[in-house]
Each structure stands twice: as C-alpha cells, then as structure tokens.
Image (cartoon, helix red, strand yellow):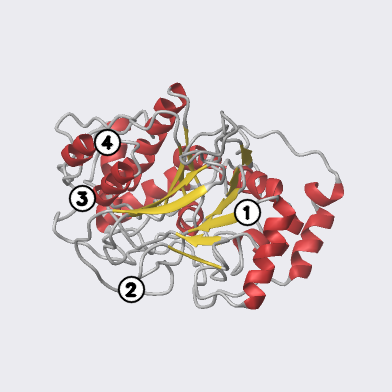
C-alpha cells in the first residue's frame, strides 16, 4: 500500500461533496455494550492455546509484532485516534515534533502536496506511538497508513521508530465491517486500485464495486491486512504500556505476547479470528473500562496489570475525551483520544510526550538533571469543538 499510493484527487466514484456514514456492512459487530470479559474465558483460552499449553507457535508470513521496546533514553510521543483525517493528522504530527510545521502546513490541505509526496520525518531518534483507529470516519485512510509506513522507514534510518497499534476499527475492516467507511473512503480505494492495477475495465466504479475491492484489500491475507499484521496490539516502551482501549487483568493472564501473535496470525490469513478475550466486548481494543471516570475497582485492576508487566503507567485511546487528554488513577492511566477527527468532533489535536530519566552525569543532582520520567500533554491551538456522534467510536 505504501509503495503504490500516490496522488489521490479527481475521484470518479461519486460527487465529491457527499459524505455519509454507515454505507455498507458486510458483517456485523455488536457495539451496544462494552463490558468486561469473564476472566474464566482468558484462563480457558490460555490453557488450551500456545501460551498456556506450551505448544510451538506456527511461523507467520509477516514479522511478529514487538511487545517490549527499550527507549535507551529516547523521547516517546503518543498520538490518539485519527480516523482518516489528514489535516488533523498533520497538526498532530507537527505538534509531536516528528514533521516540521512548514511541511505540515503545505500538506494539510485536502489535496496535499502538489507532488503527492509525504512530509518527511523530522523527529530524529524519537519513538512515535499511534494508538490505533486510523481507519473509518474520514476520507484519507490508505493515505495515512502509507504515511506512517513511510515515516517508520525514515525514523528507523534516523535512530527512531514508529509504531501503529490496532484499534477496533482496524479489526472491523479486516472482518469486512464497513459501516463507518465514508463515501470518500470508498472513493480512495477505487483510486488506489486504478493506480496499482490500471483503469477499471467495463462499467465505471460503483459503490458496490469499491466495497468489493475494499474487502479484497482488507480481508485476512489481503494487501492492507498484511501491512497491518505486523503492527502490535499491545506495546510496552520502558515502563509505559500502550493499547488502544486498555489492558485488563484477564489479558495479562491470556498472555500479551499471545495477543500480538494471534492478531498477526489472523490478519495475515494464517489463523482464526481471535476470541472474545481479544475481540470481545471487553477486548484489548474494545473495553471502555479506562476511558471513563475511574473508581477504586478500576484503579485496583489497573495496578494489577501494571505490577504484572513492570509498567508505571498505561496510555489508551478509543473513548473520546471531550475535555482533552487527561490522566486517572493518580496518573497511572492516560486517555489520549481527543476526538480530533472531523468524523468525531474535530477536537483540538493533543499528543502525549514521555521523556525517560537521563543519568545525572555529574552526580550533583543539579537543576535540569532529569532523574524521573517526565509525562506531559502537548496541545495545539483550539479551532472548533463538538460532540461525539455515537458509542461505537
């Protein structure tokens, strides 16, 4: 996808001004309730599978996503849900300092750079984590996936890295659930197919034809699904744990390495759709436990997860925070989905910056020596506000 995607305007599919949600559902995913998974399900799955039963995992046609990454003193920045919004993504990436403000400004209009090129990486050895939900609700999904693939390659050459996690909307698209794909999203698929395979023969592109093409791209083993398969579902950088919706005690019991493996296996076409521990109502990219006001039970469960993984904090997206990025449970969980996409409520872009401790070179404890991890929210200048549209963000 990254190699084949170029200039995107001039779509033949439908009138450019038209945008609609819920165009097509090739399969249904329940979104009525977001409750915890019965912990016994995790125990049963672990006892019967590779993690619990000691069986050797099958080799995959993609790299197995990493679970633990060491920063070695490098700065980490985390960006929340983007939902296909290119201009807002440009603002967030510039705010994070991984692309320049000038490049972001030149690329942030609907047409993008006249050459079709992507903004270059400017983050040096920074580690960038995007917590999932690049897909749906916006018109620039493939373009954003391709951008992050390009930035990852450049970041690695500069000593940094880029990690994109799986959100529920990535999983929904691989399942063929296109309820939240915009008309522009289907148009983008038609353009991509013409750019990679040549003009369509016979009848012009229709919505159904674009939906069929999207299904082929995103189905397990398809080109986009294969690109997604190497992305982690859970990632730990030093003492910070990242997941789209959150890691619960039963996910730890199931095995976080197995979570990443099972998702990669399914998306690459090798394994079955993960069960309810991962993909159910209380799954790693579905649970709402951490997205709303915490209580003692939630914070105690969070402490169990952090103690088990050796982490000090968790960073999640998934549930838009109308008041902006914030922390709960005494700073041990950070919620960074600020609804920045125009498909949600055009929230002001914000990113989370995490700077690890740096050794006191002189041993004098002088002011300016960073002896503790520094966590702070970086916010862009507000532009407009709004309200969430529904409960299936």
Q: Position of residue 243 (x, y in %)?
A: 55, 54
Label 4: how many Cα within 10 Å (few below 14, some 14–19, many 20+): few
Secondary structure under the numbered disc 1 in the rendered image:
loop
Left or right: residue 167 compared with residue 144: right
Residue 283: image quadrant is: bottom right
Q: State the quadrant of the N terminus.
A: top left
CA gap, disc 4 and disc 3 = 12 Å
Residue 123 placement (x, y as % from top left): 37, 32
Query: Eyeballing the image, is 48 above or below 105?
Result: below
Answer with mark 2 or mark 3, whichever residue precedes in sequence. 3
Q: Which mark is residue 13?
A: 3
User: In this view, which residue lies farthest toward the top?
Assistant: 157
**Secondary structure beneath disc 2?**
loop
- How many neighbours does mark 3 have within 10 angstroms: few (below 14), some (14-19), or many (20 or more)? many
C-alpha distance separating marks 1 and 2: 33 Å
- Residue 295 horizontal/vertical position (percent): 59, 77
Question: Which of labels 4 and 1 is toward the front?
Answer: 1
Residue, x 21% and y 46% (percent of image)? Answer: 204
- Binning the other alpha carbons within 10 Å of mark 1 as few (below 14), some (14 to 19) or many (20 upward) gives some
The quarter of the displayed image where residue 149 is located: top left
Residue 312 badge: 1
Q: Closer to the N terminus: mark 4 or mark 2?
A: 4
Q: Are marks 4 and 1 in contact (CB under 8 Å)?
A: no
Give SS at disc 4.
helix
Sequence-wise, the earlier of marks 1 and 3 is 3
Q: Residue at x 47, y 41 (%)?
A: 367
Q: Which mark is residue 389?
A: 2
Of 151 and 383, the residue lying toward us: 383
């Amino acid at each position: 996808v990254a190699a084949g995607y170029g200039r995107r305007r001039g779509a033949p599919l439908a009138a450019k001004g038209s945008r609609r949600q819920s165009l097509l559902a090739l399969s249904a995913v329940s979104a009525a309730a977001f409750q915890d998974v019965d912990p016994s399900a995790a125990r049963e799955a672990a006892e019967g599978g590779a993690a619990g039963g000691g069986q050797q995992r099958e080799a995959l046609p993609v790299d197995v996503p990493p679970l633990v990454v060491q920063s070695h003193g490098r700065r980490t920045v985390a960006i929340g849900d983007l939902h296909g919004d290119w201009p807002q993504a440009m603002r967030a990436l510039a705010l994070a300092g991984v692309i320049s403000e000038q490049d972001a400004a030149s690329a942030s209009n609907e047409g993008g750079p006249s050459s079709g090129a992507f903004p270059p990486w400017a983050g040096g050895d920074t580690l960038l984590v995007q917590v999932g939900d690049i897909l749906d609700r916006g018109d620039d999904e493939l373009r954003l996936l391709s951008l992050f693939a390009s930035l990852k390659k450049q970041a690695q050459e500069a000593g940094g890295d880029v990690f994109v996690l799986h959100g529920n909307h990535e999983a929904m698209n691989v399942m063929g659930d296109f309820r939240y794909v915009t008309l522009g999203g289907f148009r983008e698929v038609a353009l991509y197919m013409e750019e990679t395979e040549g003009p369509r023969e016979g009848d012009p592109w229709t919505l159904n034809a674009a939906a069929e093409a999207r299904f082929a791209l995103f189905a397990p083993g398809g080109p986009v699904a294969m690109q997604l398969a190497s992305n982690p579902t859970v990632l730990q950088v030093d003492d910070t744990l990242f997941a789209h919706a959150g890691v619960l005690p039963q996910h730890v019991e199931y095995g976080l390495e197995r979570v990443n493996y099972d998702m990669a296996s399914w998306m690459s076409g090798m394994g079955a759709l993960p069960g309810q521990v991962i993909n159910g109502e209380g799954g790693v990219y579905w649970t709402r436990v951490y997205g709303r006001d915490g209580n003692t039970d939630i914070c105690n469960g969070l402490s169990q997860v952090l103690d088990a993984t050796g982490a000090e904090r968790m960073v999640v997206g998934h549930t838009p925070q109308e008041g902006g990025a914030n922390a709960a449970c005494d700073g041990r969980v950070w919620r960074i989905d600020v609804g920045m996409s125009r498909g949600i409520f055009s929230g002001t872009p914000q990113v989370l910056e995490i700077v690890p401790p740096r050794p006191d070179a002189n041993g004098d404890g002088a002011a300016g020596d960073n002896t503790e991890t520094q966590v702070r929210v970086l916010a862009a200048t507000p532009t407009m506000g709004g309200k969430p549209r529904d409960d299936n963000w």
